């Protein structure tokens, strides 16, 4: 599986964040499944915003750290492992939250549900040897 160039991804993310915050359409993405998550950089301490897909789970949001099947967890995930306090922007709402990886039976149940709803995650899982984290986001 070929991965996009990181500088291209940075530009795509920058444009996506800008379009999301402006309230406009985001080409190639379903706005109702998009969330902006701001973490604190584990090395720099700087705030970093990442656009990503989410899945609703009652009053929680589920984030999938698949990194498109890469052998390494995404940077946003490594940041929240170091500091689980995040800012969430979803729809027209912004709020503080805690983001923690699901574990054990809960992780297995959620992962099965996500792969059923979004079969491409099974492809991501097949492309890597790591366990893909499912992150549960709960309002602070």
Image: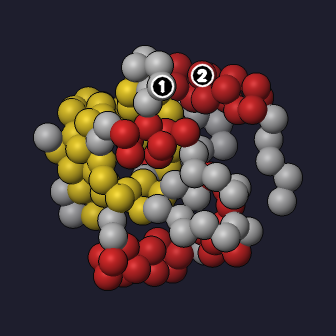
Asked which quadrant contains residue 130, the reply is bottom right
Asked which secondary structure carries label 2, the reply is: helix
Q: Is residue 119 visible?
A: yes
- Residue shown at the point (57%, 51%) measured from the top left: 73
Q: Where is residue 95 in the image (x, y as percent from the top left)?
A: 22, 32
Residue found 60% across the figure and 22% down from its top: 14
Examine the rendered structure and indicate whether residue 41 appears above or below residue 136: above
Label 1 secondary element? loop
Q: Mark 1 points at which residue?
A: 43
Q: Which residue is drawn at 61% across and 29% down?
A: 13
Depth check: give the residue in front, 24 or 74: 74
Q: Nearer the viewer, residue 9 or 17?
A: 9
Please identify the quadrant where the C terminus is shown: top left
Q: As drawn, is 81 to the left or to the right of 123?
A: left
Q: Extreme right residue here?
A: 2
Q: Is residue 136 left or right of residue 29?
A: left
Q: In the picture provided, is 61 more to the left or to the right than 18?
A: left
Residue mark closest to the camera, 1 vs 2 = 1
Which residue is under mark 2? 14
Where residue 113 sits, quadrant-wise, is: bottom left
Up-down relation of residue 109 to residue 12 (above or below): below
């Amino acid at each position: 599986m070929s991965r996009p160039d990181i500088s291209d991804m940075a530009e795509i993310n920058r444009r996506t964040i800008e379009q999301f915050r402006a309230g406009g359409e985001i080409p190639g993405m379903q706005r109702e499944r998009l969330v902006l998550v701001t973490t604190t950089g584990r090395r720099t301490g700087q705030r970093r915003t990442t656009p990503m897909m989410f899945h609703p789970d009652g009053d929680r949001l589920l984030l999938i750290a698949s990194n498109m099947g890469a052998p390494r967890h995404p940077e946003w995930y490594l940041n929240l492992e170091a500091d689980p306090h995040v800012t969430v922007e979803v729809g027209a709402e912004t709020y503080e939250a805690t983001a923690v990886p699901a574990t054990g039976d809960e992780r297995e149940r959620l992962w099965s549900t996500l792969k059923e709803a979004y079969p491409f995650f099974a492809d991501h899982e097949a492309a890597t040897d790591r366990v893909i984290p499912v992150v549960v986001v709960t309002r602070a």
